Amino acid sequence: MSEQAASRLDRRRARTRAALIGAAQELLAEDRTNVSVLEITQAADVGLGSFYNHFDSKEELFQAAVDQVLEAHGELMDRVTEGIDDPAEVFARAFRLTGRLHRRLPGASRVMLHHGPELIMSDHGLAPRALRDIKAALEAGRFTTADPELALVAAGGAVLALGQLLHDQPDRDEAASADALTADLLRMFGLDAAEAEEICRRPLPDLDELIAPASDA
């Protein structure tokens, strides 16, 4: 096979895999995982035989779909916090933006909500990054919480509950809610009220520009 033909085949395989993962993410967002492989391939608009060129089972596909959502979110948070020296502000910015993304990327948000408990301590996405930032803030003397894993559980539970609240109350201001909850967490982790509120008033990157290249789950 020529190099050019191999390259075309690789691109076609990548498109097929992306279509399958996209279909799985839509099903996850709707909490519809009790479907057949045929239904998945029809939703992805690919041949049934193509499925097994990429995944051994539905479970493997759904796990890949969840992992992609988490990692895309984590990479986005890495970009928006790059260059910030204060680990407390890094944590706060990521949390504030994640709260807003529940509205901006509702499909990805629903994927996270349907898999909430298992994601809080996941090795992918926001959880390991949040734990890293909590530990860095502890080492820098910015946070005083005694147990970083418990702090992560508190933050993870809070961001998931916020997402559910925003879905249940579509008229609620997601920015104000995310900032107020972030300030509460910062106070719980050891910052005084005035500084916590000041950090949560700092400007954020433009979310429309950040997510424009990405499609919703």
Image (spheres, rainbow, N blue to C red):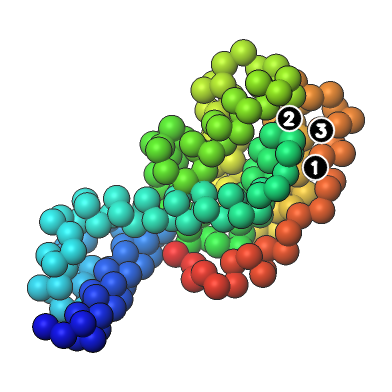
**Residue 45, horizontal then vertical, whole percent:** 25, 80
Do labels 2 and 3 touch, CB within 8 Å? Answer: yes
The amino acid at mark 3 is: Ala
Give x and y (percent) for residue 33. Answer: 27, 55
Q: Residue furthest front?
A: 3
Name the residue: 43% across, 32% down: 121
Q: State the image coordinates of residue 197 (x, y, percent, origin top left).
A: 84, 36
Q: Is residue 28 visible?
A: no
> Which SS class for mark 1?
loop
Image quadrant assignment for residue 79: bottom right
Of the image marks 2 and 3, the number of the one nearer the N terminus: 2
Give the residue number, with chain letter if any, for mark 2. Answer: 186
**Marks 2/3: CA–CA distance:** 6 Å
Which quadrant of the rendered structure holds the N terminus?
Answer: bottom left
Q: Are marks 1 and 2 in contact (CB under 8 Å)?
A: yes
**Residue placed most toward the observer, 89 or 8:** 8
Left or right relative to 35: residue 77:
right
Q: Amino acid at mark 2?
A: Leu
Which residue in the protein does label 1 denote?
A: 200
- SS category of the residue bearing label 2: helix
Ranked by sequence position, the earlier of labels 1 and 2 is 2
Q: Label 1 crowding class (10 Å Cα cut-off): few <14, some 14-19, many 20+?
A: many
Residue bearing the label numbered 3: 196
Gap in Å between the C-alphas at discs 1 and 3? 6 Å
Where disc 3 sits, the SS reads: helix
Q: CA distance from mark 1 to mark 2?
A: 9 Å
